[in-house]
Amino acid sequence: MDGACHCGAVRWRFEGVPRSATSCNCSICRRHGALWAYGFEDEAFTVAGETATYVWNRRSLAFHFCARCACVVAWLTTSRGADGRNYGAVNLRLAMEPDAVAAVPIVHHDTVTKSDLPRDGRCVADVWS
Ligand SMILES: [Zn+2]
């Protein structure tokens, strides 16, 4: 499936349907209201187009957003793992077709306990309608 920022300058493509959409309550995610679909860049997803970044969390994470329309597109680790892979997530809020992500289950991640809360049965459609 495909996603794009509001102006269309930045796009992501996610292979298949994400298994979950994470809503995180950390200091930056709660401000963005993003719904994250995780994976490795160039495997689970790709991001295309020029982005501006905001580097955070002891400079380990870079939030990528469109420099023109300011939509938050993705976050990626700032350095690759020992296997050369780059972990991150795309923001499902930018899905081109909301119906394509409507049934994806929501996972609430609690940054205080660093764990996912028990699932409550809600899916993307429940927070995006
Ligand atoms: Zn844009």
Image (cartoon, grey):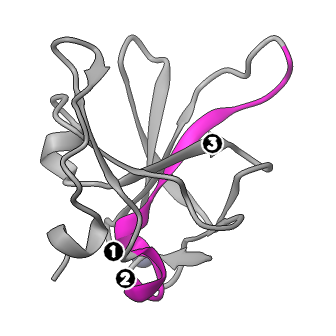
Q: In this view, does 6 lie above or below 24?
A: below
The amino acid type of the residue labelled 1 equals Cys
Q: Which one is nearer the viewer's eye here, 62 or 52? A: 62
On the image, numbered disc 3 is attached to which residue? Answer: 39
Q: In this view, does 87 lie above or below 105?
A: above
Q: Nearer the viewer, mark 3 or mark 2?
A: 3
Tell me which label, 1 or 2, sits earlier in the chain: 2
Disc 1 + disc 3, Cβ < 8 Å: no
Q: Give the range drawn in magenta.
A: 83-101
Q: Quadrant of the N terminus?
A: bottom right
Q: In this view, does 37 lie above or below 48?
A: above
Q: Nearer the viewer, mark 1 or mark 2?
A: 2
In the rendered image, residue 60, in percent from the top left (x then y), is placed at 49, 18
Residue 18 shows in this picture: yes
Q: Distance between the residues labelled 1 and 2?
A: 6 Å
Residue that appears at 28% across and 54% down: 34
Tell me which label, 1 or 3, sits earlier in the chain: 3
Tell me which label, 3 or 2, sits earlier in the chain: 2
Within 8 Å: ligand 1 and the Cβ of disc 2?
A: yes
Within 8 Å: ligand 1 and the Cβ of disc 1?
A: yes
Say which quarter of the image contains residue 77: top right
Q: Distance between the residues labelled 3 and 2?
A: 23 Å
The amino acid type of the residue labelled 2 equals His
Within 8 Å: ligand 1 and the Cβ of disc 3?
A: no
Q: Which of marks 1 and 3 is in front?
A: 3
In the rendered image, residue 29, in percent from the top left (x then y), is placed at 23, 41
Circle on res. 69: 1
Residue that appears at 25% across and 75% down: 125
On the image, numbered disc 2 is attached to which residue? Answer: 6
